[in-house]
């Protein structure tokens, strides 16, 4: 199954896992690329999403990578401040610096820790990789 996330209103956190479901979006501004990832949407941002969405449009909208040390630090700070509508606690959300070349406007490769009170044993942290998918500038 393939699901398009070409919305301008939400920031989604997609955990990259084998699920049989591919999520795609039109990103990269005028590059108009269509990356996809197999996984599950585990969260929708509710707090600070406008600021992060606006900053996403500054990085990679015109085909350049745009990842300077300052922008990486700013992105990580903004990601850390996001509030999520989710049943799992999202901890230490940050850019995946090993995959910056795949991170562009509207599509940031990330790493994070997920903890849930619904797992056994309780609150076992799970290291995850995935994507924050957000607004497109064009």
Image (cartoon, rainbow, N blue to C red):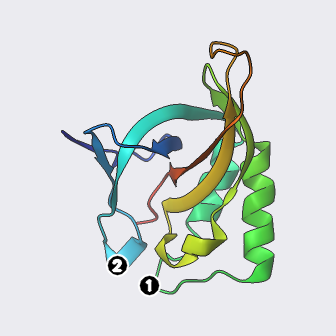
Marks 2 and 1 sit apart, C-alpha to C-alpha, by 6 Å
Q: Which mark is residue 54?
A: none
What residue is shown at x 78% (from left), y 48% (from top)? 80
Name the image quarter holding the N terminus.
Answer: top left
The quarter of the rendered structure image containing the C terminus is: bottom left
Q: Is residue 87 left or right of residue 2?
A: right
Circles 2, 1 touching at the beta carbon (< 8 Å) = yes
In front of the other: 16 or 47: 16
Q: Identify the mark nearer the N-term, 2 or 1.
A: 2
- Say which residue appears at 53% left-offset and 42% top-offset: 13
- For the residue labelled by badge 1, is the local secondary structure a helix, a strand or a loop? loop
Q: In the picture shown, does residue 52 fall above or below 91?
A: below
Q: Which mark is residue 63?
A: 1
- Helix, strand or loop at label 2? It is helix
Q: Residue at x 41, y 72 (%)?
A: 29
Residue 73 image point, x, y percent: 80, 69
Give the label on residue 31, or none.
2
Which residue is at 66% across, 53% downward?
Answer: 52
Quarter of image, res 117: top right
Residue 59: in sight, yes or no?
Answer: no
């Amino acid at each position: 199954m393939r699901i398009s996330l070409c919305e301008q209103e939400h920031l989604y956190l997609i955990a990259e896992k084998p699920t049989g479901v591919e999520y795609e979006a039109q990103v990269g501004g005028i590059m108009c690329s269509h990356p996809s990832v197999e996984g599950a949407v585990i969260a929708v941002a509710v707090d600070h999403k406008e600021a992060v969405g606006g900053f996403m449009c500054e990085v990679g909208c015109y085909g350049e990578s745009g990842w300077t040390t300052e922008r990486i630090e700013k992105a990580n700070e903004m990601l850390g401040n996001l509030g999520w509508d989710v049943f799992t606690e999202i901890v230490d959300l940050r850019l995946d610096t090993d995959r910056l070349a795949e991170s562009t406007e509207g599509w940031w490769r990330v790493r994070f820790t997920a903890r849930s009170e619904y797992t056994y044993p309780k609150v076992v942290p799970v290291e995850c990789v995935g994507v924050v998918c957000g607004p497109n500038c064009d």
